[in-house]
Amino acid sequence: MLRWLLVTFLALLLINWLLPFLARFGVGRLPGDFRFKLAGRECFVPLASTVLLTLVASLIARAL
């Protein structure tokens, strides 16, 4: 259980670190990524970007 928690934490940390780099390629601005204001706060739901990054990670995992 601790190993999965550590892997999840490291994956989120890596994605957060790479997000400015990925934004140059359009990740976060794809059709299907929703931005809206709710009670004065901006919310971001990256549905299309999540699917794209999952497919890329799956292809990398299959190649290894």
Image (cartoon, grey):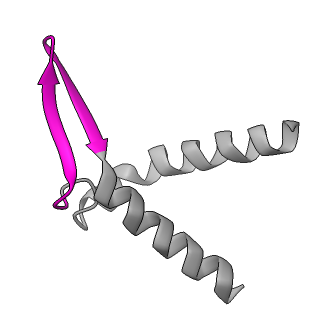
Residue at position x 58%, y 74% from top?
58
Residue 23 at x, y = what percent? 27, 57
8 to 56, vertically: above or below:
above
Q: Is residue 5 left or right of residue 35?
A: right
Q: Is residue 57 left or right of residue 8?
A: left
- Residue at far bottom of view: 63
Q: Is residue 32 left or right of residue 22?
A: left
Quadrant assignment for the N terminus: top right
Quadrant in the rendering for residue 52: bottom left
In the rendered image, residue 56 lying in the magenta stretch gets the answer no
19 to 55, vertically: above or below:
above
Q: Magenta residues?
A: 30-45
Quadrant in the rendering for residue 37: top left
Residue at position x 16%, y 38% from top?
35
Quadrant assignment for the C terminus: bottom right
Residue at position x 55%, y 70% from top?
57
Q: Main secondary structure of the magenta part?
A: strand
Q: Nearer the viewer, residue 47 or 8?
A: 47
Residue at position x 76%, y 40% from top?
6
Q: Is residue 10 left or right of residue 55?
A: right
Residue 49 at x, y = what percent? 33, 59
